[in-house]
Image: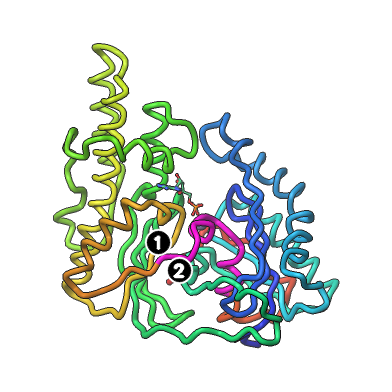
């Protein structure tokens, strides 16, 4: 086993519907290319696995080449290749893994398999490349104090992860059904906001009233740190159907519904966050995943952690919130290469801890 504290890594992520490749040097992002398939999947209102697989196959080579070009490095210069092994959609994961295995075998470079959730957790450690600095002169920033609490909020996951160090995790709580992003997307479908609806809900919620449609806080008495969104989804569906019986929802009703539902989803998270912070001590709170781009979520989290004198750390750019390969490269810099490349197989279900 070899560890890679500050090495030049080509990372690949094909876990869902984005084909991404990046070059990282330790925590420094040299390039981060993402070929989005959103347009392809819009017609299905969600990710269609076989369509995703085909698009990954077409995109992977040009995306990898562009990542190397943008970083200004050659394959030969690389110290290692990293790839997302899971969790994710099996047919999608397969494309990235097969490509990375082939590349590692052909070039004789080590292969580092990475957990996608670990990538989201460590995405906050990524830093941009300093301007006009050659690779040899790039230095790594100091590490923060641990433990920290990482909150991952994406289309596939909603979890609270205690981070004792990179590679040392304990899942404190998670969603027992839908992920927060998934709940926002499903709600968006009910009121015809297109796919993915999360960013649209954020925009419309800005002009809506969050107290227009009161929803209950789910899992209030569960006694654990888990969250749930399926009950909220049912409540909002019933409310939409009730209103639509009389006449189609007005513009104001839609924006009020967006504000109210988004508030309910985020309150479910801050409620459990508060419970965790009453019991456990951390040096900081990290946020990652696609929904981490939402400014209202950031605001509510900051409000919750303020009384504990804690600060919220978010990825330095929204591109690092969504699925991307730079976070996989950063996670790989703390990871270990596999001893047998052929043994690396997709792992669609793989908990971080
Ligand atoms: O992390 P990500 O790109 O993919 C997964 O690993 O799931 O997250 C995608 C999710 C989608 O559900 C999308 O609606 C949501 O993130 N999302 C947002 C925002 N941007 C993306 N949700 C709320 N507000 C946003 N600004
Ligand atoms: Zn993700």
Residue shown at 19%/64% (left/top)? 274
In the image, farthest residue toward the right: 106
Residue shown at 52%/67% (left/top)? 119
Which circle's residue, 2 or 1, is located before the other in the chain?
2
Mark 1 lies on a secondary structure that is strand
Q: Which residue is mark 2?
A: 121
Asked if 31 appears above or below 300 in the picture, the reply is below
- Residues at discs 2 and 1 in contact (Cβ within 8 Å): yes
Name the spot of residue 163 as percent of width and height, x first: 39, 77
For label 2, the crowd category at 10 Å Cα-Cα, with few meaning under 14, some 14 to 19 and many 20 or more, is many
Confirm whether the magenta stretch covers residue 228. Answer: no
Q: Is residue 139 left or right of residue 161?
A: right
Q: Which residue is mark 1?
A: 152
Which segment is the magenta one?
Answer: 314-331
Q: CA distance from mark 2 to mark 1?
A: 7 Å
For label 1, the crowd category at 10 Å Cα-Cα, with few meaning under 14, some 14 to 19 and many 20 or more, is many
Residue shown at 70%/70% (left/top)? 10
Which disc is residue 196 wearing?
Answer: none
Would you say the beta carbon of the disc 1 residue lies within 8 angstroms of ligand 2?
no
Q: Is residue 70 left or right of residue 146?
A: right
């Amino acid at each position: 086993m070899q560890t890679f504290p500050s090495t030049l890594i080509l990372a690949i992520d094909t876990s869902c519907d984005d084909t991404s490749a990046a070059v990282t040097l330790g925590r420094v992002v040299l390039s981060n290319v993402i070929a989005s398939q959103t347009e392809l999947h819009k017609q299905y209102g969600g990710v269609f696995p076989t369509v995703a697989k085909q698009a990954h196959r077409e995109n992977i080579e040009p995306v990898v080449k562009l990542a190397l070009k943008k970083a200004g490095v050659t394959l030969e210069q690389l110290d290692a290749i990293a790839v997302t092994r899971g969790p994710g959609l099996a047919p999608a994961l397969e494309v990235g893994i097969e490509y990375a295995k082939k590349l590692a075998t052909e070039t004789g470079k080590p292969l580092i398999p990475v957990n996608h959730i670990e990538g989201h957790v460590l995405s906050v450690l990524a830093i941009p490349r300093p301007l006009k600095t050659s690779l040899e002169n790039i230095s790594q920033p100091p590490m923060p104090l641990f433990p920290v609490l990482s909150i991952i909020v994406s289309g596939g996951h909603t979890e609270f992860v205690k981070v004792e160090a990179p590679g040392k995790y304990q899942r404190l709580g998670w969603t027992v059904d839908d992920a927060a992003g998934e709940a926002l997307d499903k709600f968006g479908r009910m009121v015809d906001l297109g796919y993915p609806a999360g960013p649209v809900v954020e925009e419309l919620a800005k002009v809506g009233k969050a107290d227009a449609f009161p929803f209950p806080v789910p899992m209030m008495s569960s006694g654990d740190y888990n969250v749930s969104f399926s009950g909220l989804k049912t409540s909002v569906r019933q409310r939409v159907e009730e209103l639509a019986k009389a006449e189609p929802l007005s513009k104001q009703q839609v924006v009020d519904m967006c504000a109210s539902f988004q508030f309910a989803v985020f309150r479910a998270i801050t409620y459990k966050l508060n419970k965790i912070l009453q019991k456990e001590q951390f040096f900081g709170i990290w946020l990652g995943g696609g929904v981490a781009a939402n400014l209202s979520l950031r605001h509510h989290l900051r409000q919750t952690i303020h009384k504990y004198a804690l600060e919220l750390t978010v990825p330095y750019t929204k591109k690092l919130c969504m699925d991307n390969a730079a976070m996989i490269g950063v996670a790989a810099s703390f990871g270990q290469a596999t001893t047998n490349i052929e043994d690396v197989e997709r792992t669609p279900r793989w908990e971080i801890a």
